[in-house]
Image (cartoon, helix red, strand yellow):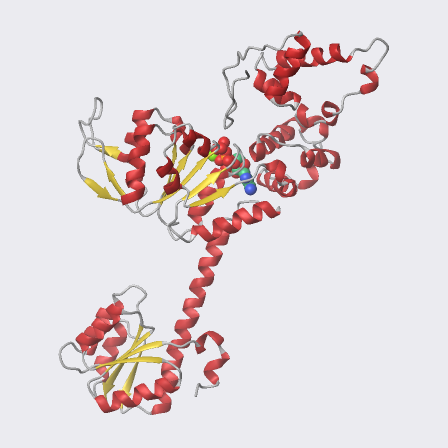
Amino acid sequence: MRSVAGCLLRYACEVARILLADDEVKLAKFLATVLEQQGHEIVRVEDGRAALAAVAQAPFDLVVTDLRMPGLDGLEVLKGVRKRPEAPDVIVMTAHGTQQIAVQAMKEGASDYLVKPVAVDEFRVRIQKILERRALIARADRLERQLEARDGLSGVVARSEAMRGVVASATQVARTDAAVLLLGESGTGKSLLARAIHRASPRREHPLVEIHCAALPDALLESELFGHERGAFTGADQTRIGQLEAAAGGTVFLDEIGEIPAATQVKLLRFLQAREIVRIGSSQARTVDVRVVAATNRDLEAAIREGRFREDLYYRLSVFPIVVPPLRERADDIPELIARFLATRGQSSARLDEQARVRLVKHRWPGNVRELENALERALILAGDGPVTTQHLPAGTRPEAAVPGYSDVLVEGFNLDDFEQGILAFALARTGGNKAAAARLLGISRRRLYTRLAHLDGDGACEDDDDTPDPGVQIRQPR
Ligand SMILES: Nc1ncnc2c1ncn2[C@@H]1O[C@H](COP(=O)(O)OP(=O)(O)OP(=O)(O)O)[C@@H](O)[C@H]1O
Ligand SMILES: [Mg+2]
């Protein structure tokens, strides 16, 4: 029967796996029975070598070992056991008069010692105490890990249901080594999440290396990732380790992954498959332990269809995809984001007047959280020491910009076609003729802008002279 006292702590009642090492078979059998009656699982061995073999085979919570045994003695068992990861506790048993060795065992890391002959009650109590302490330590470790994971993600505002889901997934995947692919529009917080995942992961004590794949020319990107040997190419006057090696034990964050050239895609795939890298100019493969988090604001599936991105690489990168929704789909986050941004600038939330707050919450934020942060920053500067009002917000967020004064426009002689032509021309002038930007400004699709321009011109044809496509948007040429 289990002791009632032990059950005061729920976790102390968990069944423990205990290894009993003693060559006095009769005594060992008796002690095993005592422990089995308490519900524990017992493995019995008769010498030191067998004890070490047993702990190497399967995990134990506790090893109870006699000090004097044939072959390897109890001290050596203790040393061998303590070296193991997640080492079990060790209690040594010693004959009366040899306590001196027991003291040494305590110095070597034994949790307790018992002097033979052992009274059954004392034996039970001592074992129970060690197991309770072990359970408490394990619980504290678990809680600490949970707290660390929460801290890692605590910098990410997540009030909305959508964002709470994102943070919950990120917290779960952070504990693993799975490759994470962060997808979402620019400014939604992908980089922030990538860093948070690293901080919440068991790798947090190791480096997080960020590589901005779009910012580097092709040749440089490859050498940045994989490193190079001296003389590998002109200018390589020294051997350099790549960032994947530099991140060993930690995480590498591959930002703008959609931008990597075909040759580098092949090398990256090889790395993800075998965790091996080969420095440029070397033939030696090196194994590196690195967790990969990647991000992109591009439509990678479209890039695959168009043959610009390898499908096999995509599957390796997106073992765990997380889609970060645009800010317009999670307006519930805006008040807290505002509070956070004001607080980090040492400003109280009262700086913002009510109308301005409502405006900010209602705006659609095409540039997402980054745009909101910039708008606030600018408004704080414009407002000086006074309150931030709608006057200090960017034109697009102001109500007067969204709702024109109809009574001023709709007067005698008004013509809708002229008005439309006027406003289209105004939008184009303001964006320097960039139709994609003008369409955005007008709140319509580019196709719709073409149709309207064509309609007003009186013919169906319209040239696409705009060669600056939106990032992340595949634009088909109008026929
Ligand atoms: N949920 C959030 N909580 C707090 N701050 C956020 C949040 N999301 C984004 N931010 C802040 O907004 C800014 C933009 O975020 P971030 O750089 O992570 O976006 P991104 O998705 O990586 O953009 P890009 O695709 O352009 O690289 C950063 O200053 C970031 O700290
Ligand atoms: Mg980013």
Is 300 situated above or below 289? above
Where on the picture, by quarter, is residue 431? top right
Q: Residue at the spot x=49%, y=43% of the render?
A: 322
Quadrant in which the C terminus is drawn: top right
Q: Position of residue 31 (x, y in %)?
A: 30, 88
**In the drawing, does residue 352 fall left or right of residue 236?**
right
Where on the picture, by quarter, is residue 452? top right
User: Residue extending furthest left?
Assistant: 71
**In the drawing, does residue 263 fall left or right of residue 468?**
left
Is 29 situated above or below 43? below
Q: Tell me, yes or no, if residue 123 can be seen here.
A: no
Is 35 situated above or below 409? below
Q: Position of residue 360 (x, y in %)?
A: 67, 34
Q: Nearer the viewer, residue 422 or 450?
A: 450
Q: Tell me, yes or no, if residue 102 can be seen here.
A: yes
Q: Nearer the viewer, residue 447 or 419?
A: 447
Is 470 situated above or below 201? above
Q: Position of residue 206 (x, y in %)?
A: 35, 47
